[in-house]
Amino acid sequence: MNGRQDELPTIFERSAPGRRAARPPRVEGPAMADLLGAEVLRSAPPALPEVSELDLVRHYTNLAHRQTSIDGNVYPLGSCTMKYNPKVHEEVAAAFEDLHPEQDPSSVQGLLELLGTLQDWLGTITGMDDVTLQPAAGAHGELTGILMIRAFHEANGEGAQRRNVIVPDAAHGTNPATAGMVGYDVVEVPTAADGEVDLAAMKAALGPDTAAVMLTNPSTVGIFETRIQEIADAAHAVGAQLYYDGANLNAIVGKARPGDMGFDVVHMNLHKTLTTPHGGGGPGTGPVGVKAHLAPYLPLPRVRQEVDGTWGLEETRSTSIGRMRSYYGNVGNLVRAYAYIRSLGAEGLANVAEMAVLNANYLRVRMREAGFQPAFDRTCMHEFVARPPEGISTNDVAKALLDEGMHPMTVYFPMVVKEAMMVEPTETESLQTLDAYADALARILQRAARDPGALAEAPTTTPVRRLDEVAAARHPVLRWSPRDEDGEAAAAAD
Ligand SMILES: *Cc1c(COP(=O)(O)O)cnc(C)c1O
């Protein structure tokens, strides 16, 4: 923002020996060394900053004010569904935080019932027969799903024959990466002029060597695949499995179900569609739903209700792909999703999809009026892809948005559209906010029209200006080190 902001000290620089917050009275009890064994104790205390409570509050409050977040303003990051997540879900999740994953199931019946119920609901929402809550993110859900598909083909004696996974060229990078990790070759199919998958190319790619087709619907260009039934039939006709990347579930939740479209496996990004703040790399959650023929391969342990009505964990199943994550998954996020579904109900979830699609179409038309060009000029789902007028770069527009106090859209993705801007306003933004975003974008284009070099300077109001992006990627400095006498930060050690 200005020189003073830039010099915001780190928490280590605020440290002064002996300074501290309130200290509770010492409680008599067994010594730590007796409880844990002396060999696990530190010989010297860790080099933690010593600060007062006020120093601490100021440090984090000032840091929070330096970033652009959903709590501050609209955050229409396409493909990420940066919706507002009601704070009450944090309270609900906190109610479970004292449980320990090693507790005996008999002492966590309430939690297991919650997880079992959530499994059922997620199956109902996606039209799937069974669900695992284990995977820790969407990409992890993809890995789980493709491993199950591989196990299915192997059980049918077709493991060696089915070598390929078909992925559209507009897909998220995690799709081909997942297929590659599981050992498959990736076959890419192009996007047709209308924004949908090229059906003829898809049919030509399908064959007895196809293990799976991975699709996102609506796709990453925000368009619903209207020929999905035909794609599903063609895939199943050659014995391939159809995988649904559920990152865009927000567009259809409560309205349509991947299971009814012919998908065999679905992952859901709970941190996108079903509440949980994300964006800082915090814990994600990617439950996976399957049709009955894939249920034998689900990871363990599985939450299940026993015949006597109590809740327990299924720990052994010979056909399972095994354990994908410790314990039951990211339980805090599962509790948030449960609370979100309960508070919205079936009608509220359908309303999410309706408003998300309406908001995206409103902003699409307003941006077109301002001079942006839609990549596919047709009704979109919950997001759309546009580009700036000739001669103006998407990067410059994104940087200029930061000076307006607004988070940019996703930029330069998907790669099938040059200068792509992928905009997803979500259902939680009001008409006034959408108008403010469109107005800001219109102002930016007008500035660029008056003075073609004007945007090159942006952002001018943020704590840091344009970064050397190549250096940030190639030589990232990830660790603080003490400054020397001249005030220069020492080079990072690793
Ligand atoms: C976000 C996203 C993923 C990956 O999900 P993570 O939870 O970030 O691992 C996969 N596909 C699409 C289309 C996405 O938008």
Image: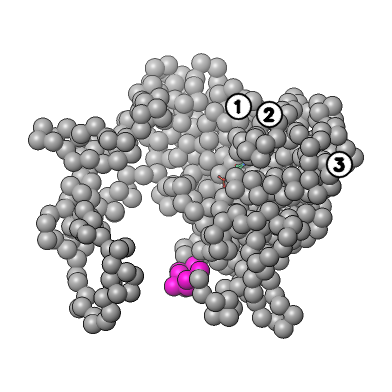
Q: Is residue 205 left or right of residue 475?
A: right
Q: Residue at x 72, y 83 (%)?
A: 308
Q: Nearer the viewer, residue 125 or 355?
A: 125
Gap between marks 2 and 1, in whole Å? 8 Å
Gap between marks 3 and 2, in whole Å? 22 Å
Q: Residue 448, relative to residue 324: is it above or below?
A: above
Give the residue at the far left of this rendering.
485
Image quarter in which the N terminus is found: top left
Q: Which mark is residue 415?
A: 1
Q: Residue at x 17, y 51 (%)?
A: 14
Q: Which residue is mark 2?
A: 169
Gap between marks 1 and 3, in whole Å? 30 Å
Q: Nearer the viewer, residue 408 or 310?
A: 310
Which numbered disc, 2 or 1, marks the residue that appears first in the sequence? 2
Query: Quick check: marks 2 and 1 in contact, CB under 8 Å?
Result: yes
Q: Residue 246, relative to residue 328: is it above or below?
A: above
Q: Which residues are magenta?
A: 93-101
- In percent of width and height, residue 252 lies at 71, 50
Q: Give residue 298's quadrant in the image.
A: bottom right
Q: Which residue is mark 3?
A: 239
Query: Disc 3 residue type?
Result: Gly
Which numbered disc, 1 or 3, marks the residue that appears first in the sequence? 3
Q: Give residue 127's quadrant in the image.
A: bottom right
Q: Quadrant of ligand 1?
A: top right
| Circle 2 SS class | loop
Query: Disc 2 residue type?
Result: Asp
Q: Nearer the viewer, mark 3 or mark 2?
A: 3
Q: Residue at x 27, y 35 (%)?
A: 492
Which numbered disc, 3 or 2, marks the residue that appears first in the sequence? 2
Q: Main secondary structure of the magenta part?
A: loop
Q: Is residue 26 left or right of residue 424?
A: left
